[in-house]
Amino acid sequence: MIERQNRLREFLSHVESKPVEWGIDDCTAFASNWVLGETGEKIELPKYSTQREATRLIVEHGGLIEAWHNHLPLICPLVGVPELGDIGIIPTRNFGDAGVIFAQNGACIWRS
């Protein structure tokens, strides 16, 4: 677990003070980049470069959850308690659903 925690810390250091780039490191791309680094599995996401384009894609899929199930089905189990480094979607009060990387003690890391 310590090794995964260190890899996550290193992964986060690359975006720590950087503004979000849509299609590069927004909440979905951020999570898929983490998966690539952890598993070597590249997730083919639809191309988008603005918040408006991302929103259109999410709406076309019927929501962020449905979009993830279409593009990240094997790595997004529907059940279970998330562990450090797992990815998933959480509802947020101000931003709606958001893709996250789960940290320790119920904390979530996401790009907004």
Image (cartoon, helix red, strand yellow):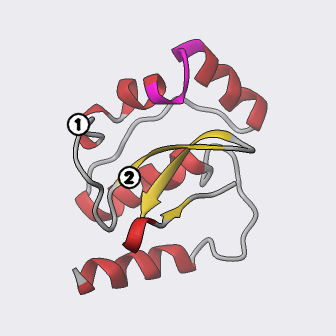
Q: Quadrant of the C terminus?
A: bottom right
Residue 77 left/right relative to 13:
left
Task: Name the disc covering residue 92, or none.
Answer: none
Q: Residue at x 45, y 81 (%)?
A: 9
Q: Which residues are magenta?
A: 60-65
Q: Residue at x 65, y 33 (%)?
A: 48
Relative image position of residue 82 (x, y in whole percent): 30, 56
Q: Residues within 10 Å of mark 1 (few under 14, many from 20)?
A: few
Q: Decide: is 95 above or below 73.
A: below
Please, what secondary structure does the residue beneath circle 1 have?
Answer: helix
- The residue nearer to you, when weighing 54 against 95, is 95
- The tag earlier along the polypeptide, 2 or 1, is 1
Q: Amino acid at mark 1?
A: Leu
Residue 96 left/right relative to 106:
right
Predominant SS along the magenta part: helix
Q: Decide: is 1 above or below 96.
A: below
Residue behind mark 1 = 74
In this view of the protein, can residue 97 be seen by the observer? yes
Relative image position of residue 92 (x, y in whole percent): 63, 45
Q: Amino acid at mark 2?
A: Ile
Relative image position of residue 103 (x, y in whole percent): 41, 69
Q: Residues within 10 Å of mark 2 (few under 14, many from 20)?
A: many
Magenta stretch: includes residue 94? no
Q: Residue at x 53, y 63 (%)?
A: 109
Residue behind mark 2 = 87
Q: Between marks 2 and 1, how big is the CA–CA gap?
A: 12 Å
Q: Are circles 2 and 1 on residues that touch, CB within 8 Å?
A: no
- The residue nearer to you, when weighing 72 against 24, is 72
Relative image position of residue 66 (x, y in whole percent): 44, 22
Residue 111 left/right relative to 75:
right
